[in-house]
Image (tube, rainbow, N blue to C red):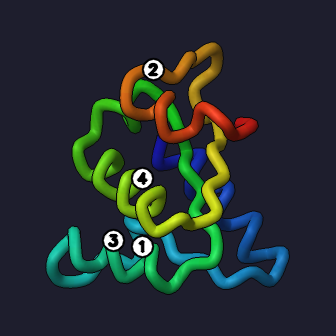
Amino acid sequence: DKEICQQIYDELRRQGLKIWIDFNEMHGNMMDAMAHGIEQSQTVLLCISEEYRRSNFCRAEAQYAFKRQSNLIPILVQRSYKPDGWLLFLISGLLY
C-alpha cells in the first residue's frame, strides 16, 4: 500500500497541505512518533486494505485516532476490499 499512499501524500503536498506520513516522518520510538503525528493532525487518512487491517501498528494508529475523536477519512486502496473486524467497527459510520 506504500506506493499509493505515497501518491496521495505527493498530491496533497502539491495542493499546499502540510502532511505527516508515517514512513517519511518516523524518528525514534515508532509508537511515540505515530502518537505525535496523530496529536498534531486535524485529520487522519486511513489507507485501508487487508494488509492495513492485519497490521498491529496500523490498528494501534487507527484506534488512537478514533479514541482522540480525530476526523477520520478512510481511503480504500485495495480494489474490492470489504473491511471487517476492528476496522469495520471503526469506520462503519464513515464513507470510504
Q: Residue at x 38, y 23 (%)?
A: 85
In three-dimensional space, the C-alpha distance between marks 1 and 4, rounded to whole angstroms, equals: 18 Å
- Amino acid under disc 3: Met
In three-dimensional space, the C-alpha distance between marks 1 and 3, rounded to whole angstroms, equals: 11 Å
- Where does label 4 land, which residue? 62
Q: Which label belongs to residue 24?
A: 1
- Amino acid under disc 1: Asn
| Coordinates of residue 58 in the picture (x, y in percent) | 34, 49
Q: Say left or right for 94 vs 57.
A: right
- Where does label 3 land, which residue? 34
In three-dimensional space, the C-alpha distance between marks 4 and 3, rounded to whole angstroms, equals: 10 Å
Dot 3 crowding, Cα within 10 Å, few <14, some 14–19, many 20+: many
Quadrant of the rendered image containing residue 23: bottom left
- Amino acid under disc 2: Asp
| Coordinates of residue 79 in the picture (x, y in percent) | 64, 20
Foreground label between 2 and 3: 2
Sequence order check: which comes first, mark 2 or mark 3?
3
Label 1: element kind: loop
Sequence order check: which comes first, mark 4 or mark 3?
3
| Coordinates of residue 21 in the picture (x, y in percent) | 48, 69
Q: Residue at x 66, y 84 (%)?
A: 18
In three-dimensional space, the C-alpha distance between marks 2 and 4, rounded to whole angstroms, equals: 14 Å
**Number of marks in the rendered image:** 4
Q: Which label belongs to residue 84?
A: 2
Nearer the observer, 21 or 84: 84
Foreground label between 4 and 3: 4
Q: Residue furthest left?
A: 29
- Amino acid under disc 4: Ala
In three-dimensional space, the C-alpha distance between marks 2 and 1, rounded to whole angstroms, equals: 28 Å
